[in-house]
Image (cartoon, grey):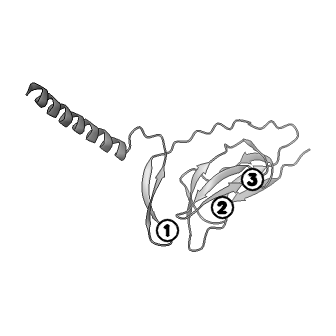
Amino acid sequence: MDESVNIEILIPDLPESTKQAQISTIYVNEGQKVSEGDVLFDVETDKVVLEVVSQSAGVIDNFQVATGDFVSANQLAMNVRSIQGNEVPNESKNIVKVENVSERTVKDDSGRIQLEEVIGNSLFDKRGIICGVLGLVMGIVIGAIFTAILLG
């Protein structure tokens, strides 16, 4: 009888002075087959994004984190279980994820403010609405001016 081996996937050590990070993206599903070196998920701090890769081939098992969760260094995220002889893992890599559009300011080491955008599935964002309203107002004003000139 084959005995499976579970490899724990832990949150990596975080940069100095960073106590928590956020799971920004998960690239695998539970039950999915992975190879050594496959990217499993991203951990984001205010300064860096760390890719966490599989250290061995196997099947993803025992999810302990989800997108958006705040985590700390060396926390268990999931397991990679070795494949047993007659097991057929899920080959699907279709991942359903919903991201929100958000803007936030991040201070870098020199104190400058940077604008960071996360692209998501929002139909409208603030800039699009503002540009649309400005375009509508400009069109009405220009149309009124030309109408007044033509009618004299």
Location of residue 112 (image quadrant): bottom left
Q: Position of residue 2 (x, y in %)?
A: 90, 45
Give the CA distance from mark 3 to mark 1. Answer: 30 Å
The reply to whether callout 2 and callout 3 are in contact (CB within 8 Å) is: no
Residue at x 22%, y 38% (from the top left corner): 137
Q: In the displayed image of the protein, which residue is found farthest to the right?
A: 1
Choose between 55 and 149: the one closer to the eye. Answer: 149
Quadrant for the N terminus in the image: top right
Looking at the image, which residue sits at the far top? 151
Mark 2 surroundings: few (<14), some (14-19) or many (≥20) residues within 10 A: many
Q: Position of 148 compared to 67: left or right?
A: left
Q: From this viewpoint, which residue is outermost toward the left?
A: 152
For the question of whether residue 64 can be seen, the reply is: no
Q: Nearer the viewer, residue 118 or 74?
A: 118
Residue at (35%, 46%) from the top-left corner?
127
Q: Which residue is mark 3?
A: 54
Foreground disc of the pair 3, 1? 1
Residue position marked by numbered label 1 in the rendering: 108
Q: In percent of the image, x 45 and y 47: which residue is there?
A: 101
Mark 1 nearby-residue class (10 Å; few <14, some 14–19, many ≥20): few
How far separated are the C-alphas under marks 2 and 3? 12 Å
At 11% from the left and 30% from the top, the residue drawn is: 148
Question: Looking at the image, is 73 positioned above or below residue 121?
Answer: below
* Residue type, label 2: Ile
Q: Earlier in the sequence, mark 2 or mark 3?
A: 2
Q: Give the residue number, with chain letter if any, for mark 2.
A: 11
Front residue of this view, candidates 23 and 124? 124
